[in-house]
Image (cartoon, rainbow, N blue to C red):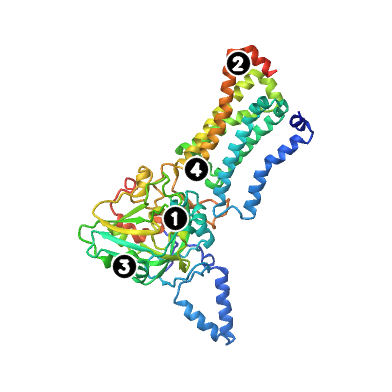
Amino acid sequence: MPAGRVLLHPLAKPAVFLASLMPLAWLVWGAAADRLGANPAEYLERSLGVWTLRFLCLTLAVTPLRVVTGTPTLARLRRMLGLFVYFYAVLHLLAYAWFDMGLDPGDIARDIPKRPFVLVGFTAFLLLTPLAATSFNRAVKALGARRWQALHRLVYVVAGLAILHFFWMRAGKNDFAEVALYAAILGVLLGWRVVQAVRKRRSPGRAAARRA
Amino acid sequence: MLIQPRHDGFIHPVPSEITPAAGYHGRRELLRLLAAGAAGAALAGWAARDAFAQVPRPGKLAPLAAARSGVGGAATMEKPTDYKDATSYNNFYEFGTDKDDPARNAHTLRTTPWTVEVEGLVKKPARYALDDLLKLGAQEERIYRLRCVEGWSMVIPWVGYSLSRLIEKVEPQGGAKFVEFVTLADPKTMPNVGSRVLAWPYVEGLRMDEAMHPLTLLAFGMYGEVLPNQNGAPVRLVVPWKYGFKSAKSLVKIRFTDHEPKTAWNKAAANEYGFYSNVNPLVDHPRWSQATERRIGEDGLFAKKRKTLMFNGYEQQVGQLYAGMDLKKNY
């Protein structure tokens, strides 16, 4: 299969890596060139949040796409994309802490519990941290595949919290079109997994054969 | 006598920040000309200019001449926000909920002909054509701070006159305790009217003493020119000590009532937006702090946000309106 073959090329991963850095490069250029509108801080903060969500969708799309299209080599990208979720989440949090809170630990500690939508976003970030920290091969071995997988199912909780964070943030303007779009994408990606799990439970043999 | 800077109310930057470099270089150039005895015609221009407003015109729309205002607090020394920022980043939900929507969509607004109806508990109800309303008072330049409830702020040189001019003209009846401001809601020219974000038309209101305060401005222009559509053309309200949304845009009706008007944002979320909505760093919005603000175009990305001032820095002028009131309850 040609698409699968492309992903085996030695430059495939570096290419995806560079492409994943493009949003950041674009934002940095925009900030330097004063092209982000009247409130660049707000623009950066929001864009970094949206890119976190986009990478979350991409990461969660890897397995369904791999199975549905029969492209096992797609799995090569999953870890990198997952780490980019964390990368953009860290930048999003940093933008909030720096631009909004002036990096004042006291102000941040007071602000997070005061605002439910910030608390939800921060919780999602905290839950992502152990996933990023156990992404390398040795961690998988140390934990054992089963426990590692159980831990990494936290990403489904993170997806829910991310949508709630976005929804709450937009609630002030009753403007939910974009929220609904991302909720629908994540809903399909998570729904597909539920369907798979149910099928697997009904006929374990067939599911195992499918996965092989 | 030693004059101590006050740290409790107005925060004025150093003079070198107040006066743009071009300004004081210009003055130095003038002095040089004077010294050389070559001022002549240049001085005539300077003298003529002096009586008029100070903020340079951007040259985008029709000029609206204005004299400097003598009203207390009406000319902050802070640097006016760039015209580009003030006209491309604002809220005007009739044209969309994103802050670049008004600038993008408001070109469809038709501002001629335009009338403002004054009705309710007044002895002389009237229907003013815009031209008559413009001539009702002498146009003044008022350089006000503007603090949005969302946590950002600007400094805008408005052109208009105190709303009290109009109120005196129409003679409110004894029972008139509040003023209601109704704005245009035309689904044909305003794409977001009909969305469920707010109840249309957008309605705002003031208590009579607030409406009569000399700082409360009926504005027809900004930066020495008529108002751009996206900023509430052709006539709007500006109440500098309240959050920006109280300053209703594109007014079509001013109604005097005996009861507190039901305002648009209060109807949408009463626990978040009260009738008064005075700028108050001590009373947080339920979803964010109001203690600080980001001055658009002034504060760098990594600068700490500036402290929000009580009544947006107009406490000296308007504080007595709220003497004895619990501002936490009457947010």
* Other residues around mark 1 within 10 Å, as few (<14) / some (14–19) / many (≥20): some
* Residue at mark 3: B165
Is the residue B300 above or below the residue B225 in the image?
above
Image quarter in which the N terminus of chain A is found: top right
Q: Where residue A200 is drawn, which disc sits there?
A: 2
Q: Residue at x 71, y 37 (%)?
A: A16
- Circle 1 sits on which residue? B189
Between the residue at mark 1 and the residue at mark 4, the CA separation in whole angstroms equals 44 Å
* Circles 1 and 4: CB atoms closer than 8 Å: no
Q: Using the numbered discs, state the Cα–Cα distance from disc 4 to disc 2 in whole angstroms.
A: 49 Å
**Of the residues tagged 3 and 4, which is closer to the observer?**
3
Say what amino acid the circle numbered 3 marks. Answer: Arg
Q: Is label 3 in contact with label 1 (beta carbons under 8 Å)? A: no
**Chain ID, mark 3:** B
* x and y percentages locating residue B251 in the rendered image: 37, 59
Residue bearing the label numbered 4: A107
Q: How many badges with numbers are in the image?
A: 4
| Amino acid type assigned to the residue bearing label 2 in the image | Lys
- Callout 4 secondary element: helix
Q: Is residue A33 visible?
A: yes
Tell me the element at label 3. Answer: helix
Residue B144: image tag: none
Q: Position of residue B249 (x, y in %)?
A: 40, 57
